[in-house]
Image (cartoon, grey):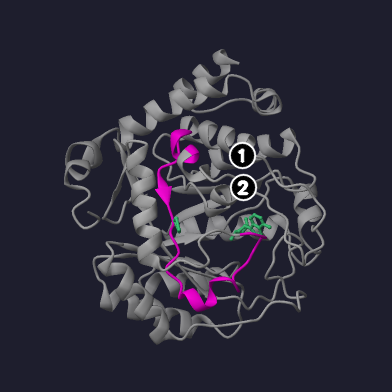
């Protein structure tokens, strides 16, 4: 397996059968993580980027089998933050050092193009030095264009799986892989920095499915890929399914770092939920982003995509302190800037930003 890992590091691509072999066996994990860390260091030094996540609505018109806020879950108490509340989260986040805000929500029809565009314009007007990321699901190309024109910089839309049959196992019929992929290509064409991604260990996932994910990411060339373990939610059709493992999640993070050295790879909350040191382990496997929650504490428990989600009782400031300490302990430093992807090894990050880092956070 070392041979394949070395080849991936050198050539940034593998054949489908090679991906399958690597993923099915998960051998030489420590070696993979070592290589992945060395690539991360070359591109980003010891910098970890932070994105402030604002979960602004848990209304959703979709019914994905894995997701706790699916339409048919009557047990969810639904909420929607107002523009003022969202701006207040950003203001607090700005004071804590955040320079990227991720506005994430279910597919909520109340937040139509006009309201979303207005929201983006308001956040950008209040914080012109910040990047705004949207994560609000599938829309037409025209809608995406309006949001881009309003000033949104980035868009996160996990593809969930690049295998059409597996996609059908995770979603009701009205959602298709083809439509999801069209969205991602449209976002790229418009000029967004794009994030795709998938869950590790979702029901029905095979090494073949994961190989397809790797090939899709090779083709799409997203700026970010969000990988977290699947965790069952007790009020969904997948309540009795097994969770994805930490080991598989870390292995996939390591592979992705070698596949695309400058990729933004979050060490996710889901990873921190299945392992108390999951987020540290993610960074040590090649991840370079953390996304602390800036949502008001009063609504956090209501944005439960899966069971036992961490950080639902903590104020944003506490999470920042906690994460800063966690990163420091493993030799990394959360930096306070937008954290756009590096165009070349080292570049702006290793020489300048890393040495500047920490100011706001200390
Ligand atoms: N476990 C882990 N991740 C989940 N997501 C949704 N439901 C779950 C779950 N039960 C992920 C999906 C979605 C992202 C916002 O959260 O990949 O795209
Ligand atoms: Fe939220 Fe540790 S990051 S409490």
x, y percentage for residue 41?
33, 31
Q: Quadrant of residue 331?
A: top left
Q: Residue at x 78, y 48 (%)?
A: 203
Residue 153 seen? no
Would you say the magenta stretch is mainly helix, strand or loop?
loop
User: Does residue 138 appear to the left or right of 221 in the view shown?
Assistant: right
**Which quarter of the image is occupied by the C terminus?**
bottom left
Please report the bounds of the magenta region as a residue range: 281-308
User: Does residue 219 appear to the left or right of 128 in the view shown?
Assistant: right
Q: Nearer the viewer, residue 157 or 65?
A: 65
**What crowding class fits label 1: few (fewer than 14 Cα within 10 Å), some (14-19), or many (20 or more)?**
many
x, y percentage for residue 236?
78, 64
Q: Residue at x 69, y 27 (%)?
A: 20
If you read the primary sequence from the N terminus, does the residue marked by circle 2 or circle 1 appear first? 1
| SS class, disc 2 | helix
**Which quarter of the image is occupied by the N terminus?**
top right
**What crowding class fits label 2: few (fewer than 14 Cα within 10 Å), some (14-19), or many (20 or more)?**
many
Q: Residue at x 39, y 52 (%)?
A: 323
| SS class, disc 1 | helix
Asked whether disc 2 touches disc 1, contact meaning CB atoms under 8 Å apart, the reply is: yes
Q: Nearer the viewer, residue 77 or 325?
A: 325
Kindly identify which numbered label has been placed on residue 274. 2
Q: Which residue is mark 1?
A: 246
* Picture layout, residue 334 above or below residue 307: above
x, y percentage for residue 49?
35, 50
């Amino acid at each position: 397996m070392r041979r394949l890992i070395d080849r991936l590091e050198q050539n940034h691509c593998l054949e489908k059968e090679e991906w399958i072999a690597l993923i099915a066996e998960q051998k030489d994990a420590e070696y993979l993580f070592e290589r992945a860390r060395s690539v991360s260091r070359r591109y980003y030094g010891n910098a970890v980027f932070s994105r402030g996540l604002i979960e602004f609505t848990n209304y959703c018109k979709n019914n994905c089998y894995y997701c706790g806020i699916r339409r048919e879950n009557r047990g969810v108490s639904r909420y929607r933050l107002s523009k003022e509340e969202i701006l207040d989260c950003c203001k607090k986040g700005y004071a804590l050092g955040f320079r990227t805000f991720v506005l994430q929500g279910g597919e909520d029809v109340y937040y139509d193009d006009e309201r979303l565009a207005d929201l983006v314009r308001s956040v950008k007007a209040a914080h012109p030095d910040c990047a705004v990321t949207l994560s609000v699901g599938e829309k037409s190309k025209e809608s995406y264009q309006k949001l881009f024109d309003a000033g949104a910089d980035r868009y996160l839309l996990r593809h969930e799986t690049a295998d059409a049959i597996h996609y059908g196992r995770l979603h009701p019929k009205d959602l298709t892989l083809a439509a999801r992929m069209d969205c991602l290509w449209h976002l790229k064409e418009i000029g967004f920095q794009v994030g795709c991604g998938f869950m590790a260990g979702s029901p029905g996932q095979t090494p073949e499915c994961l190989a397809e994910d790797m090939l899709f990411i090779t083709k799409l060339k997203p700026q970010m890929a969000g990988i977290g373990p699947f965790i069952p939610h007790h009020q969904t059709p997948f309540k009795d399914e097994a969770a994805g493992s930490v080991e598989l999640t870390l292995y996939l993070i390591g592979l992705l770092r070698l596949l695309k050295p400058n990729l933004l790879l979050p060490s996710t909350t889901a990873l921190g939920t299945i392992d108390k040191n999951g987020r540290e382990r993610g960074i040590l496997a090649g991840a370079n982003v953390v996304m602390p929650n800036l949502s008001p504490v009063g609504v956090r428990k209501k944005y439960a995509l899966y069971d036992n989600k961490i950080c639902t009782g903590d104020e944003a400031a506490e999470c920042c302190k906690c994460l800063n300490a966690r990163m420091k302990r493993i030799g990394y430093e959360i930096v306070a800037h937008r954290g756009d992807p590096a165009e070349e090894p080292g570049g702006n990050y290793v020489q300048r930003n890393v040495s500047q880092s920490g100011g706001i956070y200390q």
